[in-house]
Image (cartoon, rainbow, N blue to C red):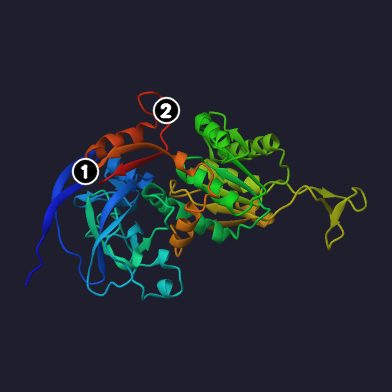
Amino acid sequence: MSPVALPSHNVAVLYGPKDLRIDDRSVWPPSQGQAQVAVASTGLCGSDLHYYMHGRNGDFAIQAPLVLGHEAAGVVTAVGPGVTHLVPGQRVAIEAGVYCRTCDFCTKGRYNLCKGMRFCSSAAVFPHADGTLQGRMNHPAFVLHPLPDKCSFEQAALAEPLSVLIHASRRANLTSGQTVLVYGVGAIGLLACAVAQSLGASRVVAIDINQTRLDFARNNGFASQTFCLPPVDKAKTTDEQLRRAKENSQAALAEFGATAGFDVVFECTGAEPVIQMSVHVRAPPILWYPRNVVPSITRFTDGHLASQTAISGGKVMLIGMGTRNVILPLSTAALREVDIQGSFRYANTYPAALALLSSGKLKNVEKLITHRFPLKDAQRAFNLLARGQDEEGRMVLKVMIESS
């Protein structure tokens, strides 16, 4: 006997650039290993905005109508055969990436690199995997995570971007007492600041080109100090760009009073000049002195001495997605043993993210959600996110869509 569809529900479907329509679709009962979720809240992400504005995100162009949204939480309304750890009425966070669970990456716990990954609201595979901007959806139960009692739906929707920073922090081995610099204080950068503080960073500072966002970061305790990059015309040559990156880095370090640089740098913009700066703020010049000239210093094995205030090493974590090909000051990084690491999405982070969100350790994290819209007004929400400020001139950070 064929399954019977339930009453239809609203779905926000992207048909092309800026062509977002609210459609009615049937809801089918969940199949083997699936659960059906009534989506409560979905946070809009930068990748969603790229699809909305251009019909593509990087190399991935939509080839068929696509439901956007992947930062979401809701309530289980039904479970399919074989699902035993969830029950109807249970509140859950929806992990958007559905991985194969059998490849080498998956079995080694690095499922974010799974070649068979199907990620909700992404056009990376075809047929596309629809996202969470809909009233109800069926989703594999193994990537649905029960919410702690003190975790709201909106907080749970933040578990997805928060997971990005938990994963990056684990890759960086970020530990208590380290100093952290964050480039870019959009929602991801602010969460980077919050995660660093939750892990006991001794100092967290931030750099951006937007003074309003920097003021928000400082006034709400995400960063203890900030630096606004000066506006400049685009560099005409690579040499000029690299020189500017070094000069801007030196200006920022002077402003922060951090001649030794920072232990960990989170680069959350994806912009080439900022990536170049990231290497320099982690790697100030090594100061060499003749033997027995400078007191209170460290002696190297070749007999030379270096100032203790010129520490090399440390990590630059590349989190932001933007520039495809980047020219880097690799000699600077190599000579000062700066580790440049990539960080892609996340793996095995949702339980930690939900526990952190419900713990109260992320001070003012709820203030990241600046605007809310019902599902029927999803197009208005995307247009607002694209503008960056509302009609009253207020800053837009995280826009939340309420599906029910």
Mark whose residue sits in front, 1 or 2:
2
Q: x, y percentage for residue 73?
A: 34, 53
Q: Quadrant of the N terminus?
A: bottom left
**Residue density around tag 2, few if under 14, some if 14–19, many if 20 or more, within 10 Å:** few
Q: Is residue 327 visible?
A: no
Identity, as a three-letter code, of the amino acid under mark 1? Gly
Badge 1 vs badge 2, beta-carbon distance below 8 Å: no
Q: Hey, which residue is sitting farthest left in the picture? A: 1
Per the image, the residue denoted by label 2 is 394
Q: Which mark is residue 344?
A: none
**Residue density around tag 1, few if under 14, some if 14–19, many if 20 or more, within 10 Å:** many
Residue positioned 35% across, 61% down in the render? 97
Q: Earlier in the sequence, mark 1 or mark 2?
A: 1
In the image: residue 325, left or right of residue 19: right
Q: x, y percentage for residue 332?
A: 65, 50
Q: Helix or strand or loop: what does disc 1 sit on?
A: strand
Which is nearer the eye, 278 or 79? 79
Q: Helix or strand or loop: what does disc 2 sit on?
A: loop
* Labels in figure, total: 2
Residue positioned 63% across, 58% down in the render? 175
Q: x, y percentage for residue 24?
A: 13, 48
User: 234 above or below 123?
Assistant: above
Identity, as a three-letter code, of the amino acid under mark 2? Arg
Residue positioned 58% across, 52% down in the render? 198
Q: Is residue 186 visible?
A: yes
Which is nearer the eye, 399 or 105? 399
Which is nearer the eye, 270 or 387? 387
Res. 176 image quadrant: bottom right
Q: Which mark is residue 16?
A: 1
